Amino acid sequence: MRFMMIVKASKDSEAGKMPSEEMLGTMAKYNEELAKAGVLVDLSGLQSSAKGARIHFTPGATEPKVIDGPFAETKELIAGYWIINVKSREEAIAWAKRAPNPHFGEETYIEVRQFFELEDFQPSPAIEHHRQVGERLAASKKSGA
């Protein structure tokens, strides 16, 4: 089961403040634990919303609207993530609880969300198409393309 552990943004992360050397070292140790356990799929920090955009889809509009950042609601923004592959929701939560507080000394959240897998859906032509696209993507990653 794949889960995303989502680190919520803080005022500092939204201001573009870089993590301290101490925090980078602490995170590196945690990331190494995930890798050694064989559960880490991917991870990254995200730059502030000031460098981002939102695409707003409105029913009846001829095309989506682009809204440039920054965005006001810090508590709703994402500062980074891990993707892990574990046996259960409980195991995902256990890993999230072991994570260092990404915003040293500040209140923050790490949200844990399970991915949909194709097996969660009833077989259909659309699901088969998704499966084929996934297989082509996996093949291109293996070949380095």
Image (spheres, rainbow, N blue to C red):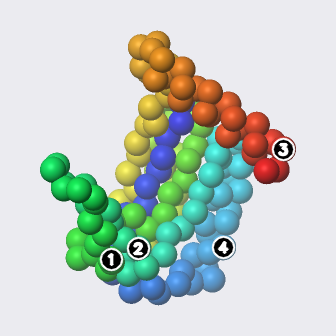
Q: Is residue 136 visible?
A: yes
Gap in angstroms between the C-alphas marked 2 and 4: 27 Å
On screen, residue 67 above or below 5: below
Residue 25: assigned label: 4
Dot 1 or dot 4, earlier in sequence: 4
Q: Which residue is mark 3?
A: 143
In screen coordinates, is 118 left or right of 34?
Answer: left
Q: Looking at the image, can residue 74 be seen?
A: no
Q: Of label 1 and label 2, which has the lower sequence position?
A: 2
Q: Is residue 124 left or right of residue 136?
A: left
For badge 1, the amino acid type reads Asp
Q: Which structural element holds mark 3?
A: helix
Q: Nearer the viewer, mark 1 or mark 4?
A: 1
Q: Is residue 32 left or right of residue 30?
A: right
Q: Which residue is at a point 67% across and 66% down the rendered structure image?
A: 28
Contact between labelled residues 4 and 2, with CB atoms less than 8 Å apart: no
- Rounded to the nearest whole Å, what is the CA distance between mark 4 and mark 3? 33 Å
Residue type indicated by callout 2: Gly
- Give the residue pinned by disc 1: 68
Residue 63 on image: x %, y %: 27, 58
Residue at figure coordinates x 50%, y 69% from the top left: 46
Disc 2 or 4, which lies upstream in sequence? 4
Residue at left 57%, top 75%?
23
N-terminal of the pair, mark 1 or mark 3, is: 1
Residue 36 at x, y percent in the picture: 75, 47
Tag 1 near tag 2, CB within 8 Å: yes
Pointer 2: what residue? 52
Q: Position of residue 18 (x, y in %)?
A: 53, 84
- Which of the two labelled residues, at mark 2 and mark 3, occupies the earlier sequence position? 2
Q: Quadrant of the N terminus?
A: top right
